Amino acid sequence: MELSVVFTLLTFVGLSTAASWGYEDNGASKWADTYSTCGQNSQSPINIETFDATLQASLGNMTLTGYDTPVALTIKNNGHTAQVDVTGNQYISNGGLSEQYKLAQFHFHWGSDDTKGSEHQLNSNAYPMEVHFVHYKNSLGSLGNSVSVKDGLAVLGFMFEISDSDNANYADLISKLANITAYNTSNLVSLTNTALMNFIPSNPTNFFRYSGSLTTPSCNEVVVWTVFTETIKISQTQMATFRTLMSSETDANNQQYNIKDNFRPVQPLHSRTVYSNFYSSSATAAYITVYTGLLSLILSTILSY
């Protein structure tokens, strides 16, 4: 989850302006050398083993408020991703959250090809892209006030799947990527006023929940993660357009890279528990397999007498 793209890292957590980070040359593996919090034990993203998730029916469904109202949006290239800033009153609540959280922005993580790109994985399967909707505790008043508070942030993660046809709901956003190809945080391009429900699955219901961190430095462990099972469809052509954006990172010849593989590898779960608000089909299938095997064993034992 890209948070340094909203304000500078200095504004957020008082880090030295000399500190930097990136994805090229296996960069994510080196973050902990500069940002010690990136080496702690509740880091994100993770691989979610769906059959190991603990059902917590009390989570119920999440309430999205203001997501169905068209809102003014701007998009920019912050050097690590395409970020959409939101000016409006969109909130999430319920779904096991302690209080109401307000939306600040959403951004994307993608791969250099369609076999990878998502930060989270489900049963070790990666998706070509993942979008993060970043919310902060409304009672804390701002994103900056929330990045150092436990559970200060709540992020919704949605995976993308390749489709044979374009996703019309993303047509305007993707067409505007041509206007932010270069890395320039001050180049804010307006999108058509759009209801945010257009950018997510039509009825997002089933999700996994765990406590984790920002997925970019300084990796603060302040995030309530909600990763949905429902996916967003996108064509290969649309997906390829994201890869045309230029990074803030440069090679030995001071040439900028394309933004690609801007995802952090999955991190160890350690002692954390992943919860779900639904019966996982994988878990159900595993249960049926075990039950069927046990039943066959019992019947064969009875018939042998």
Image (tube, helix red, strand yellow):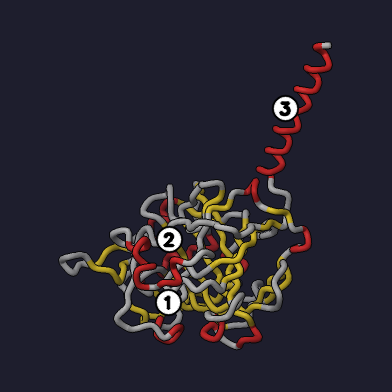
- x then y, percent, for residue 143: 54, 82
- x then y, percent, for residue 51: 65, 46
Instruction: From this view, report whether residue 293 is shown above or below residue 5.
Output: above
Residue 160 got which mark? none
What's the CA distance linking mark 2 and mark 3?
A: 39 Å
| Callouts 1 and 2 close, C-beta under 8 Å | no
SS for callout 1: loop
SS for callout 2: loop
- Is 248 in front, or is 290? 290
Instruction: From this view, report whether residue 258 is shown above or below residue 230.
Output: below
The residue depicted at 73 percent of the width and 54 percent of the height is 55
As shown in the figure, which amino acid type bears the numbered disc 1?
Val
What's the CA distance linking mark 1 and mark 3?
A: 52 Å
* Of marks 1 and 3, the one in the foreground: 3
- Is 282 in front, or is 239? 282
As shown in the figure, which amino acid type bears the numbered disc 3?
Gly
Pointer 2 residue: 264
Quarter of the view holding residue 31: bottom left
The residue depicted at 44 percent of the width and 68 percent of the height is 38
The residue depicted at 47 percent of the width and 56 percent of the height is 266
SS for callout 3: helix
Pointer 3 residue: 293
Image quarter (top left, top right, bottom left or bottom right) of the C terminus:
top right
- Is residue 179 rendered to the left or right of residue 100? left
- Is residue 17 rendered to the left or right of residue 92? left
How many residues crowd mark 2 within 10 Å: few (<14), some (14–19), many (20+)?
Answer: many
Quarter of the view holding residue 195: bottom right
Pointer 1 residue: 5
